[in-house]
Image (tube, rainbow, N blue to C red):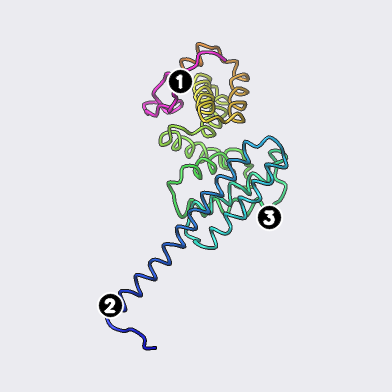
């Protein structure tokens, strides 16, 4: 059997190679999407066993996606999301130093590949605020990251809740109430009971009154960022606790 040569053969070879690479990239993208779905399902699962099952399956799928395409930011974020949730399945504590390091490596790799990945920026910002300095914590930098997420993502919930805590500690109560109110409404709209509970706990600690909550839902500026417009994508303003 003779081997085809010439411009036509070369073009066909390139076309075939491109098709194969595209298929791999698409497969990695599909796996990354599935991995993130597993992470999200784990977050709303009602039992520990179900959460662990989702996270372990999600991490394994994300690892396969990275094996196919190491340049996929979403695949690396899939590992971060599932591994991070596994590490804190029994509470907000570091249960494995090696696991924690891998989690941070995957998050940093995500941002290296896609500096505008808002979910990764939000996660990084939260960690920088909450981690001790010895483990890489940097509250000032984390706050700036979350404020950027707030400006660019009208549906972010965790960034709002974390900034609400930061602003409350600083004494900026009105901004904290506004963020927690918005976070609760966004969580209700997206059917995230876990985040609704967190937002309500924050509002309870702030002793927010119904009229303050209504006012917080109505503002169109970024709480804590004077002169910056970033209204939350809240469909229905509620005026009760």
Q: Are marks 1 and 3 in contact (CB under 8 Å)?
A: no
| Residue 71, placed above or below residue 7 | above
Q: Which residue is mark 3?
A: 98
How far apart are the alpha carbons under marks 3 and 2? 52 Å
Q: Nearer the viewer, residue 53 or 1?
A: 1
Q: Quadrant of residue 158?
A: top right
Q: Which residue is mark 1?
A: 236
As drawn, is 226 to the left or to the right of 141? left
How far apart are the alpha carbons under marks 1 and 3? 44 Å
| Residue 221, placed above or below residue 104 | above
Single out the residue that lies furthest toward the front.
1
Q: Nearer the viewer, residue 217 or 208?
A: 217
Mark 2 neighbour class, 10 Å CA radius: few under 14, some 14 to 19, many 20 or more? few
Is residue 188 found inside the magenta-colored segment of the image?
Answer: no
Q: Main secondary structure of the magenta part?
A: loop
Where's residue 212, x and y in %?
50, 14
Where's the N terminus, which quadrant? bottom left
């Amino acid at each position: 059997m003779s081997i085809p040569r010439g411009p036509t053969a070369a073009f066909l070879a390139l076309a075939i190679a491109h098709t194969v690479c595209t298929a791999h990239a698409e497969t990695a993208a599909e796996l990354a999407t599935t991995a993130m779905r597993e992470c999200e399902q784990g977050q709303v699962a009602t039992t520990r066993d179900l959460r662990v099952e989702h996270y372990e399956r999600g991490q394994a799928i994300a690892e396969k996606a990275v094996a196919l395409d190491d340049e996929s930011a979403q695949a690396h974020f899939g590992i971060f999301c599932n591994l991070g949730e596994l590490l804190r399945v029994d509470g907000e504590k570091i249960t494995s130093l090696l696991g924690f390091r891998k989690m941070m490596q995957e998050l940093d790799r995500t941002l290296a590949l896609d500096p505008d990945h808002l979910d990764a920026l939000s996660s990084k910002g939260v960690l920088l605020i909450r981690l001790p300095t010895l483990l890489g914590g940097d509250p000032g930098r984390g706050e700036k990251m979350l404020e950027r997420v707030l400006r660019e993502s009208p549906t972010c919930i965790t960034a709002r809740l974390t900034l609400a805590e930061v602003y409350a500690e600083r004494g900026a109560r009105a901004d904290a109430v506004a963020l927690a109110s918005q976070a609760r409404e966004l969580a209700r709209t997206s059917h995230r009971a876990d985040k609704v509970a967190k937002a309500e706990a924050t509002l309870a600690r702030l002793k927010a009154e119904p009229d303050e909550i209504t006012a917080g839902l109505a503002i169109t500026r970024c709480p804590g960022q004077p002169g910056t417009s970033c209204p939350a994508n809240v469909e229905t303003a509620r005026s009760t606790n």
